[in-house]
Each structure stands twice: as structure tokens, then as C-alpha cells.
Amino acid sequence: MSFGWPLALLFGLAVPAMLGIYLLALRRRRPNAVAYSSLALLRTAVPRRTRWRRHLPIALLLVSLAVLALASARPEITSEVALGQSAVVLALDESGSMCSTDVSPNRISAAQTAARKFVDSLPGGTLAGLVEFNGFAEIAVSPTTDRTPLDQALSNLSVGPGTAIGAAILQALDAIAEVDPKVQPISNAVSSSPLVPQGFGSSATSDSLPPGTPKPGVHGYVPDVIVLLTDGANNRGITPFQAVPYAVARGVRIYTIGFGTTNPGPLECTQQEMSGELSAGGFGVAGGGAGGFVAGSGGFGPGFSGGQNPLVADLPPLREVSKATGGVSYAAQNESALAKVFANLPKEIAVQKERREITWFFAALAALLALAAAAASTRFSPYP
């Protein structure tokens, strides 16, 4: 058991203080004795009471105060929630770098296959959703137990310029908020625009958590999680670090996967995997490949910083995002490694821990004890 306001436990110090006052009062009464000639006559005049009954009312009152002090500290318990009762939102990168052929046949095809197997492996009652992101992020499929729309969305992925990881996190939080009333939604103005939310600075290249970001799990976790896969670095809009406080405040853990090798190959995508925007931005037909495409000079949007290769997953920030939210970060350099990560994820998040406040129980118990103290005081009073 933990406490939301542990300092309130100091109120419990009133209990030993009152006990000391009570014992001192009893001690002062003893010298006030009266001499009687007959003890037998005294015994018949004084009501018969066992010694413990005399102290029962004050004992109940002190216990009531102790329990009330516990209630004021907002006690919480942690219970386990099965994965089948939670929501898993997959945030999948669709940036142009996902056309890299360092993973056969290319990154986006490998990610499609592994993600589809992952979704199909989830327990039937688990809500699963999909967020797609490149230069912007959007909820492609709201969390649902129906796997058909998810399979269709995963089969129709198309790449575009830019990598908006921070916006993807916010959209994933909005997707969870649709099905979990404990998770507050993010303002549409924040989650769908490239603007940095008020209070978190104005730089799209911020590489550290905002000051005052709370520790993960301080107020417990919800059973819902975000699984984010990307092969690059954030270069559009709100940064992942600026999105983290929103996830921490809502108790949502983020599991990140950095995908691809450090030696990316040519960027080749099929016609179906191409978006009109990216094709117009500098992709042309790859030599020798029917229906294949390769990136030209205009294939990526501006905004890269710190010399980070846009074709290589920026793993350190991903690890920090997972650590800051209570999740786990993974790296996968090929299709088999990615399949292994996805295969192990249900085991990692199979049972989620949810923290619940039980103040009401202690408050009710304290009230009952106080009533019992009053009843005992009336029942065992020496005065009619």
C-alpha cells in the first residue's frame, strides 16, 4: 500500500499525544481517595464494571483517529489488470526513410508484417488501435476488438515526408482517451498541429525533458499502453520530450522500438507504399526495379538537427521516452529481430498494474469506530 499524501500521516501523532494525556489524567485521579470504614459497603454501592470496559471508549476513539489519519494520507493499492481489459495503441512511422532497403524488402513492408502478427497475437478482448505518422500524425483506427480494420489499415500504409514522433504520442493518448475515461484527451490544437504546446518552449529540436517533469508511476499507471515504432529522428512539430509530460500525467506507458540498421540502403517503395506528396517531393523510378521508387534530393522535409542521420533511428531519445513514462525501449535491425520484439511484447505487458485509491474505506472505518466509541461511552458510563 502507498499513499498519495504521505505527509498527512503526521496527523497520526495526535494519537499517542492523546493517549499520554489520558494516562496522565488517570494517574492524577488516584491520590483523591476517600476513607471508608467498610469496604463491603463500598463494593455494594459502586456499580460492578470490569476494568477494560472503563477504557474501551477512549481506545475506540484513539483507533478511530489513527484510521482517520491514514485516510487523510489518501491510501492506494496496486492491483493487476489483465491485458484483455486494456487498450494497446500502435504508433507506426510512415516517413520516407521507411522505404530503406537495408531491411528486406524494405522497412515498411517488414514493419507491416510484424505489426500485423503482433495485433493478431493480442487476446481477443484487448482493444487495439493504430496511429500513423510522418510529417503529421493521425488516428487511423480507434481502439477496437475488431481486427479487420486494423489489418486493412496496416495493409494500406503509405510513406510521406517528415517524422512527427511527438505528435504521434499525443494522438495515441487521444486514441486511448476515446476508450478509457481515466485518460483525459489532448487538445486537438496540440495533438494535430506542428506547434509546440504552451509551457514547453518553442524549439522543435529540444533534446531534454521539460523542467519539473514528474517521475513515472507516482500516481499509478493505467492498463493502456502505447507501442511506438520509428526508424528516424523527430523533425516536425512537438518533440517526443515535450510530449512525455502528457503521457506521465495520464499514467500511460510508452514502449518504443527503434527500427533499421545504421547503414541504410537505397530507398525503394512500391507504388502502393508511396503517397502522392512524397512522390511529388523527389522520388523517382529506381533503375532496374519494376514499380520501384528511390528517393531524390527533395524526399525529406527540413528540420534535422545535431547531425542526426534521418535514415537512422535516434535510439537515445527513444530510450529516454520509455524510461520517463515507465515503459521499455527496444532496437531491431532486421525483420527477424523486429518480429522477436513484437512477439515478446504481449509477455511484457500481459499483466498491467493499476493503482486505486481506497480513502473511502478508511474514512468509513474511522466513522464506524467513532460511533462505536460513542456507543461504548454511553453503555458503560457509571452515571445513569
Image (tube, rainbow, N blue to C red):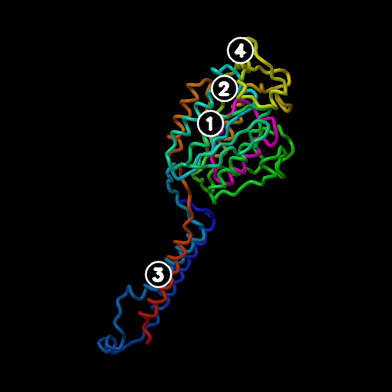
The circle drawn on residue 289 is 4
Q: Which is in the foreground here, disc 4 or disc 3? A: 4
Residue at numbered disc 1: 329
Tell me where residue 33 sits by quadrant. bottom left
Mark closest to the chain's N terminus, 3 or 2: 3
- Verify whether residue 170 appears in magenta: no
Q: Is the residue marked by circle 4 packed among few (<14), some (14-19), or many (20+) residues within 10 Å? A: few
Looking at the picture, which amino acid does disc 3 mark? Leu
Residue 16, visible in the rendered structure: no
Measured in 3D between alpha carbons, the distance from the residue under mark 4 to the one under mark 3, in whole angstroms, is 85 Å
Secondary structure at numbered mark 3: helix
Looking at the image, residue 154 lies above or below residue 243:
above
In the image, taking residue 36 as reference, residue 126 lies left or right, namely right
Mark closest to the chain's N terminus, 4 or 2: 2
Residue at numbered disc 2: 107
Are the residues flagged by discs 1 and 3 in contact, CB closer than 8 Å? Answer: no
Secondary structure at numbered mark 2: helix
Mark closest to the chain's N terminus, 4 or 3: 3
Residue at numbered disc 3: 60
